[in-house]
Image: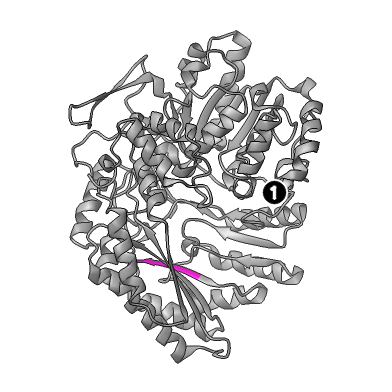
Amino acid sequence: MNAEIERRLERILPTVQKPARYVGGEYNQTVKDLAEVDTRVVFCFPDTYEIGMSNVGIRILYEAVNNMPGVWCERAFTPWGDMEDAMRTNGVPLYALESHDPLSDFDLIPISVGYEMSYTNILTMLDLGGIPLHASERKSLHNIVFAGGACTYNPEPLAEFFDFFSLGEGEESTVEIVDCYRAAKRAGLTKDEFLREVAKIPGVYVPSFYEHRYNPDGTLAQIIPLHGAPEKVTKRIVQSLDAAVFPTKPIVPSTEIIHDRVNLEVMRGCIRGCRFCQAGYTYRPVRPRLPETLYRQAVDSLESSGDHEITLSSLSTSDYKFLEPLTDRMTDYCAARHIGLSVPSLRADNFSRDLMLKLQRVKKSGLTFAPEAGTQRLRDAINKNVTEEDILKTCEIAFSGGWNNVKLYFMLGLPTETDEDVLGIADLVFKILNTWKAHAANKKRGVRIHVATAFFVPKPFTGFQWEQQITPEEYLRRARLLKNSMFSKSVEYDYHDASVSEMEAVFARGDRRLGPVIEAAWRRGAKLDGWLEYFDYDKWQDALRECGVDPGFYTTRGFGLDEVLPWDTIDPGVRKDFLKRERARAYRSEITPDCRHGCAGCGANCLLEGGVCDA
């Protein structure tokens, strides 16, 4: 452990909230002898410890890299505001939890970027760790900073801060990147020579190898590859999840985290085609794990961690084709040991009484469903493939089985939405309330229906990537219209912050001109923007004005169907012509059947060996 940092931490940790976030030393963490290590890696997560330690991807990559002899991978997270202030006042750099060495001591600094509103946290971590912010300022082969995660499907707003991006699934590509770095280090290559080598790894995008040119109206005119870089960089996928690395000895957090449980990923990808859902497209094609693999991983993880809860997770867990045999075995194991078993991401069109009874054996938690829209016309437009009958039947099953709490998630501002669609949400909630009155097995405790609405954000690589976002004012008008239409005390309604979603849309569809905006907002004090305690809309508006950037260019303007898009260099496997067809079908309120009812021809199967999706 770094003795000097340890000494200073002894003084400041008693003065900050939740000091256990910053001490490390957790059970099952990896510690290696530095004398046997030639390459040091620190995985950075640009949010708090509680959020980062709940991230399955970080845990998987931590395991994959630490399986490499001669390589030590550690972790770092964004400190809360009080800890950042204390660290700066006392001269404590951001450090890795395992060794307490500063970030500047590390060879490779990968950062997982999963949410647009974490962008300023990236700058906080680099600056606090003693790392120059801009890739152009980091001249040597030391402190190579790269990124992966959901937001790298449009890496351009962050292009000036990262040396390169790793696109898609990282279990295999991250190991290849580390091996490439070790070879470059042994050969004494320069940073530029290393970047030319790492760019040869499939899935690696080096932004400095591409020139962006703009039209007089501000739209992109051309993206020009340089130094022999490919016109398109295709994401990486893992062919077989059963053979992929999975941490069955997970780190046991030193304090409570958001998802304090074993998280078992049953499949990757989604058979549905919701037109607003970026993950539903970018995680294609569908690849399930076998139930015997999952059962073994579940038992090993529970026994090595001592956790008392396990979640079966995916984008749509009830679509996992082996769910019945898996839950049969899991409920027997969990019930005998008083371990909670939860199955989130359920769909209203395939929720069964049998599944409900199995879940009741171990734990009866609230049920959560996402109809997304209040009318059938709009649900068809977004390709939700769920009917009002499905929703009410599911609620009937749940209420008759003893459930009294239901959470319902919707979006406001979806393409083609009208006030009739907004009021349709209230009408659907009223019908659900009446379903409880007619079928509830237990009416003594009453019913709680929690309704939440999010502000639609058009995301890259979806059928709606070209759409306009409504203004925050219009979103709030629709939210008030909905709120005024729900009168029952049994219904609780809340809606997302409109200004946060506006900024999320700016960065989701932004280009390289937003890099200076991010830095300007950060220098004005913007940080931890995903937390309402810290998000300051005025700082962002000031930064946009300072940099001469109109946020409406990326939000309310909408994008032309033939416009060059900032993310056109990236290939997620789903073809643009397919997304255009999905957009056209949305405006006709036509559904596209899910993958099990016939291939829609999105193109993602081409990423699979043999080209056959295991949906």
Q: Looking at numbered disc 1 in the image, what kind of residue is underneath it?
A: Gln
Name above or below for residue 6 compared with residue 498: above
Q: Is residue 365 magenta?
A: no
Q: Quadrant of residue 6?
A: top right
Q: Quadrant of residue 361?
A: bottom right
Between 368 and 337, which is closer to the camera in this rendering? 368
Question: What residue span does the magenta drawing correspond to?
Answer: 368-373
Regarding residue 575, the answer to whether it shows in the image is yes
Residue that carries the numbered disc 1 in the rendered image: 17
Colour scheme of the picture = one colour
Q: Position of residue 392 (x, y in %)?
A: 39, 80
Q: Main secondary structure of the magenta part?
A: strand
Give me the residue at 60% from left, 39% from top: 78
Tell me: residue 502, above or below residue 312.
above
Quarter of the picture containing the N terminus is: top right
In the depicted structure, whether residue 518 falls above or below residue 134 = below
Q: Quadrant of the C terminus?
A: bottom left
Q: Which residue does the image show at 18% across and 27% down from the upper left?
A: 216
Q: Nearer the viewer, residue 164 or 186?
A: 164
How crowded is the residue under tag 1: few (<14 C-alpha within 10 Å), some, or many (20+)?
A: few
Does residue 358 appear left or right of residue 417 in this picture?
right
Asked if residue 249 can be seen in this view, the reply is no
Q: Is label 1 in a helix, a strand or a loop?
A: loop
Give percent across and percent down for residue 127: 57, 28
Q: Position of residue 13 (x, y in %)?
A: 75, 41
State left or right for residue 483 relative to residue 13: left
For image coordinates 67% across by 32% down, the residue present is: 89
